[in-house]
Image (cartoon, rainbow, N blue to C red):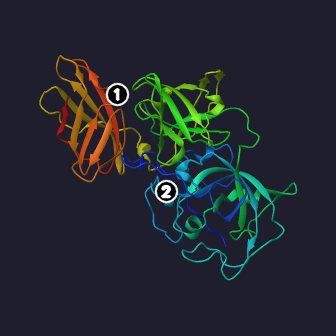
Amino acid sequence: MNRRVLSTLCAFALVLLSLTALPAHATVPEPTTPVTGNATYFDGLGSPYGGCGLPQSELESQDFVALNVYDTPGDYNFYPRPVTDPSKVGIWDNGRNCGRWVRVTIGDFCTGVNDGAPGQPFCRNGSFVPDEFNGATLDMLVADSCGDSNAWCRDDPYHLDLAKASLGRFVLNGQTVNLLPDHFNNRHIQWSFIPAPDYTGDIKIGFLQGAQQWWPAISVSHLPNGIHGVEYFANGAWQQAQMNSDMGQSYIIGGTTTGGTQFQIRVRDASDALLNNGRVYSFSLPASCSPQCSPAYTQVSYTTSDGPSTSPSASASPSTSTSPSASASPTTSATGTPPPAGACSATITVTNSWPGGYQADVTVRNNGTSTINGWSVSFTFPGTQQVSNAWNAQVTQSGQQVTARNVSYNGTLAGGASTSFGMIISGPNQPIAPISCTA
């Protein structure tokens, strides 16, 4: 019997990191030698992105797998992602195993029922038996996540969901074998992590749909050994970039200057070591991404600290999606009314919106002639809105009340000067007024 396990899609502005809770790391032991799990298959990544933050067309291999988001045996509830309870984090590891490779070996065939029914044993009314396909192998890329509420994705810590087309590309004794249509039935497999096979070249960098000056969301791919972090150079120091939800190859970076469109990054691999001995990758926001990137993925060329390295130019065509940039162009509308003139004032403007959320930019202005050293902006949501991500300010929320304070580099404002910060907000786009500023 087959079962298509649905990909868990992570639209880039839908579920960003919580302001109060940090993602936990997996407690499932990482395989250093082959482990045995059940295998299922699925048709392909969703649109526009798979769980790692890349369109399927941009993967370096069409042989790919999904790993379990949750490790909750007997518990089939859904929990917010990224997962904050370490006891519930599956081998997906909140995206930290994205971009890695696994070597998969075909194991025993199930002669009974292996349907992933909650609370039921695997291969009930039968047993796992070897056959002529045991030992067939294939190297596959981690590109998606399995968060479904079935026994495969919850009860089996080492379950793998395989790309369906790959079931015709396993190799045994030098010959390609095909497990479909009659030789699969959710078999056992053995697998372990491996470095990228036959790796050559360097990484690829691309901006995601909706990326722009104040929300530079990138994906990093073609990795020699996965990715555990991205650091960007800003205002004279290296900063830790925030992962884009649990899409482990996508990060929100910053410009080398506040609000700039020139970027420098370095990457840490799955061992937490800096890639290529700390190589620095320098690139710009493409002109085509003004006011924002429209395609699902816009690849960029870059130079490196140890010489030029230009990635092939390619970009995916726009995909139909329910992500923030599905609309043809952003809407720009003022939703806040500034308070009476004081030491400082703030105005809020909606710069993009989509079903279920929107982006707002706040401008903070020094109304006086004397320099201010620090500011705080406050407002109250009219409904159940939540700030899911923010940049260029320290934002906290308690109920409907939101407070934003300056960060180290934008608190000092000369007379008449202004600065800005941005937020991704989940919930209906309703007018916010009043908005106050104190200095």
Q: 66 or 265, which is in the foreground? A: 265
| Mark 1 Cα-neighbour bin, 10 Å: few <14, some 14–19, many ≥20 | few
Q: Which residue is mark 1?
A: 408
368 relative to 46 in the view: left or right: left
30 above or below 327? below
Residue lying at 33% horizontally and 37% vertically, measured from the top left: 394
| Mark 2 Cα-neighbour bin, 10 Å: few <14, some 14–19, many ≥20 | some
SS assignment at label 1: loop
The picture places residue 177, in percent across and down from the top left corner, at 81, 60
Amino acid residing under circle 2: Pro
Question: Which image quadrant for residue 39?
Answer: bottom right
Q: Which residue is mark 2?
A: 86
Quarter of the image with the N terminus is: bottom right
The picture places residue 184, in percent across and down from the top left corner, at 72, 68
Instruction: In the displayed orientation, state which residue is furthest to the left.
Output: 340
The picture places residue 221, in percent across and down from the top left corner, at 61, 39
SS assignment at label 2: helix
